Amino acid sequence: MSQSALQPSSKKASSDFDQQDWASAYCNVQEELTNKELIPQKGSIPTELSGTIYRNGPGRLERNGHWVHHPFDGDGMITALEFNNGQATLSNRFVRTKAWQEEEEAGRFLYRGVFGSMKPGGPIANIFDLRLKNIANTNVVRLGGQLLALWEASNPHSLDPKSLETLGVSTLNGVLKTDEAFSAHPRFDPGHHKTPRMVTFGVKTGPKSTIRLMEFATEGPHAGELINERKDNFNGFAFLHDFAITPNWAIFLQNSLDFNPLPFVLGQKGAAQCLSSSKNSQGKFLLIPRQNGDFAGEPPRIFEAPNGFVFHHLNAWEEEGSVFVDSIFYDSFPSISPKDNFRAIDFELLPEGLLTRCEINLSKGEVSTSNLSQQCCEFATVNPSKLGLKSSYAWMAIAERSHGNGPLQAIKKLNLTNKDEKIWSAAPRGFVSEPLLLPKPNSESEDDGWINIFVWNGARKATDMVLLNAKDLSEEAIIELPLSVPHGLHGCWASTN
């Protein structure tokens, strides 16, 4: 590979990295491609791999010299990689949200961002402007015939799955009210209740918070239709990005946070910057019975959670009267203050995310914890067929260093039973994204498939698509994309097999 940043290894390399290599990924996407043919620079694309990888993330981070304060405030852009008979094509499109179109026409930012981005002009220009800008930048999923770009504080945007054209804001055929919160982190039940379904939620926060749990059909003539729902109220402010499911439960971790909205109202901070880990309360596990499970119709069960903050869960399952939940715990809520430059952030000052197992004993009301890995990680996943069941393996993005925080530069496969691990590293000049597991068609082996990752190549200031064998993390294919895709968030695999 020319100017390759990638140095695959089964051993830990140096923890040194160039801050500019990492920060260079935060750039504006300059073009939109349609069905651009791709040729691997290394290896080949398996012929049995058939379908499309969709990824979402911020694609517009600067306007007229004014930068977003946090990359989570960047406008959403969808990247689609389609595989068919050993060939690959690339397309990408910005999500044409109302705000994106207005700001494109104006050539400047017109809205504040939840994570601290301000309109030009300082506090005077931002005071009392409490509008939320739906940036559709967090996830993208297939639901029936729709492709949905998700941002959890409002309605999804519907896109054409092939052209990526924005069709408009979707209320999912009237299921959602206008601007109703809709999670950017749904879970796809593989068939615990006879048929596959998408399980998701919306949360309305306040001194009391309301969680609306929803389940949608994903196959057959009723794909995209709401199957069932329920609403539950809980005391306290609820910041919920992710959750986990088992056949019987939807499992939330209500992080212990304080929220002071005054700096947001006065135009001094973004809404998320007004959150801080609370010293006066304890986090809670909220177990909401699923409607087709054994405890349908019963009230939620609440348990004290360990100290810390959780964005993402790996998986959950039930066993002998307990619910097990594997989550990535931080010591506290990570935030960027109004004076910080996110491109120059000091990783040493940020809490690290550690994969932790919690056992919730339903009869005793007790929660015990154990550590699964001491290495900083994010974006952990299991085989989709094991969602809600006990799994043998997990794949995750990790920091190159063995302890402490750092940029995500490697992929780890972790044996959840004996803690054996395999590592593929893009260090020192490569930086990885969320790994997606693409199961091999008709395979019954949990680790039979491929791991897909987008890697920011600091040497050539662009993105590489890397396909790894899920069993041993050996390289199957590397494609140097003709596109610079900033560090992204979530995505999905839509198989055509």
Image (cartoon, helix red, strand yellow):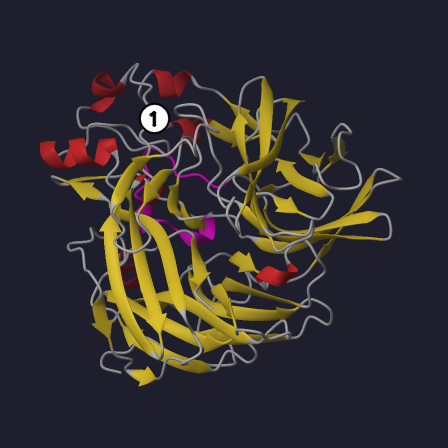
Q: Is residue 360 above or below residue 52?
A: above
Residue 13 visible in rendering: no
Residue 438 visible in rendering: yes
Q: Measuring 50% from the left and 63% from the top, which residue is drawn there?
A: 398
- Viewer-side residue, 199 vs 435: 199
Q: Which residues are magenta?
A: 334-349
Amino acid type at mark 1? Leu
- State the image coordinates of residue 100 (x, y, percent, origin top left): 21, 36
Secondary structure mostly seen in magenta is: loop
Which residue is outermost to the front?
Answer: 221
Judged left or right of residue 357, residue 224 is: left
- State the image coordinates of residue 61 (x, y, percent, origin top left): 24, 44
Q: Measuring 38% from the left and 20% from the top, which residue is drawn there?
A: 263
Q: What residue did someone put label 1 on?
A: 132
Q: Measuring 52% from the left and 80% from the top, which residue is drawn there?
A: 11
Judged left or right of residue 165, residue 362 is: right
Q: Is residue 420 magenta?
A: no
Which residue is outermost to the bottom?
Answer: 43
Judged left or right of residue 348, residue 357 is: right
Q: Mark 1 falls on what kind of element?
A: loop
Judged left or right of residue 302, residue 386 is: left
Q: Measuring 64% from the left and 75% from the top, which residue is drawn there?
A: 445
- State the image coordinates of residue 16 (x, y, percent, origin top left): 39, 68
Q: Quadrant of residue 285?
A: top right
Q: Quadrant of the N terminus?
A: bottom left
